[in-house]
Image (spheres, grey):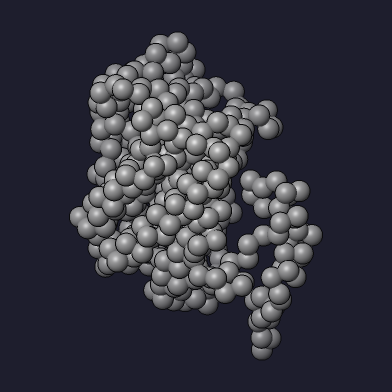
Amino acid sequence: VIQAPAVAQKRTTREWQQADSAHFLHPFTDHHGLSSKGSRIITKAENIYLWDSEGHKLLDAMSGLWCVNVGYGQQALIDAATRQLKELPFYNAFFQTATPPSIEAAELISSVTPPGFEHVFFTGSGSEGNDTVVRMVRRYWDILGQPERQVIIGRVNGYHGSTMAGASLGGMSGMHAQGGLPIPNIVHIDQPYQFEHGRGMDRDAFGLKAASWLEDKILAVGPEKVAAFIGEPVQGAGGVIIPPKSYWPEIQRICDKYGILLVSDEVICGFGRTGNWFGCETMGSKPDLMTFAKGVTSGYIPLGGVAVGGRVAKALIEQGGEFQHGFTYSGHPVACAVAVANIKLIQQLKLVEHVRDDVGPYLAQQFASLRDHPLVGETETCGLMGAMLLVKDKSTGTTFPGEVDIGMVCRGHCFANGLIMRAVGDRMIIAPPLVMTRAQIDEMMALIRRCLDLTLADATKNGWI
Ligand code: PMP
């Protein structure tokens, strides 16, 4: 028997950092800047806490990267992976084959999705899920004899992944500037961000206005050319942009009016984050396709996919013949076994109800109380995700000038004080694990207040306000 090597050798933080900058290219990273500073090395985790290689404890208010919904260290997921690794670590789902975990995961996901979603296509990530969406949507219209329906409409500042199609569907200008994106036939409308586009307006009136931009775009492109609209129920990476209640039902009405497919990117909002299994349920839309990833395995192992509603499934299955698409890891048995254990754990712990009825409303109340802080212009939450906007002058809602990266200043204080909170421009955002308790929310709020005070002290000292 050959023993497994020690997974990670013991090295000092400096040694890890040197090897890291010598060999490891990180996602979305300026490596020149990083190598002079050195990476933060995270070494272990439990529940909602992480530890770095220096032994510092951090409250992870971002669930890793919006994914560790059940928190770290859940034995049921570890056991499911271990069992499946021993039993059958890999087999593919090509060539008329399936494995028990891939079947069970598809069945279980279908049971927690809204009515009408009976089928699941698995991928390895959210980006691959959205690439699948592009191919599936265009294939759908081909099958229906309308191949001219090619155009997919996304939103400015939306995020749908980093592959060619994912980054094209998304509306991040920095990403489009690299690599000749978006790919053809993907266009964008503005996001429903009231601070940017509708200050002073009635909230629901703004929601209807923002949704009307979809109809404007459909008419500009030509309704007969539009295949689908894609959006996140709540934009995550864009800064936790929560649309008015009126927005998604109106988007739905417009999609229905022109017969175009509605795609809900549930990569962040799925699996309990918003207080329902899926964000579209919270926001009031009935999509045709839903992309998922992250929370489906709580990030313990990579898995993504597309939940396929009846309209598309019927065409693909009954009329479509072979859909020439798929990945080596579509339905990976270990990933699917972890998904099954994760979904059952969410059910056993009643995490969706916990978010909807208990910690979600409690977080909303606590977050709103931050508005008394001199730096906080607005706060909003949806389930267990929240955002606060840091402003220079609350009375006028004036933001800091571009050269003052107030979000990064605040984020620096968070890391130094044992809290992981993310900065998106001037918006500080959180999406903590769904297992979080009220007491842990109190602990997080005390850390947030401390970091806001330290940021305010910097702003005062440096003459930024
Ligand atoms: N869609 C959304 C809404 C996301 O937030 C993300 C990742 N943050 C993706 C897609 C892409 O997922 P992945 O990074 O797994 O490819």
328 is higher (above) or lower (below) than 178: below
- Residue that extends furthest to the bottom in the rendered view of this protein: 1
Total marks drawn?
A: 0
Q: Is residue 305 visible?
A: no
Give coordinates of residue 303: x percent, y percent.
49, 55
276 is higher (above) or lower (below) than 180: below
- Residue that extends furthest to the left in the rendered view of this protein: 357
Give coordinates of residue 160: x percent, y percent.
50, 39
Give coordinates of residue 435: x percent, y percent.
33, 64
In terms of image quadrants, where is residue 223?
top left
424 is higher (above) or lower (below) than 172: below
- Residue that extends furthest to the right in the rendered view of this protein: 22
Residue at 28% x, 38% y: name it.
283
Residue at 29% x, 21% y: name it.
201
Camera-nearest residue between 31 and 195:
195
Camera-nearest residue between 230 and 67:
67
Q: Is residue 341 visible?
A: yes
414 is higher (above) or lower (below) than 274: below
Residue at 64% x, 49% y: name it.
27
From the image, which quarter does the N terminus lie in?
A: bottom right
Give coordinates of residue 117: x percent, y percent.
31, 44
Camera-nearest residue between 421 and 192:
421
Residue at 50% x, 36% y: name it.
465
Camera-nearest residue between 341 and 358:
358
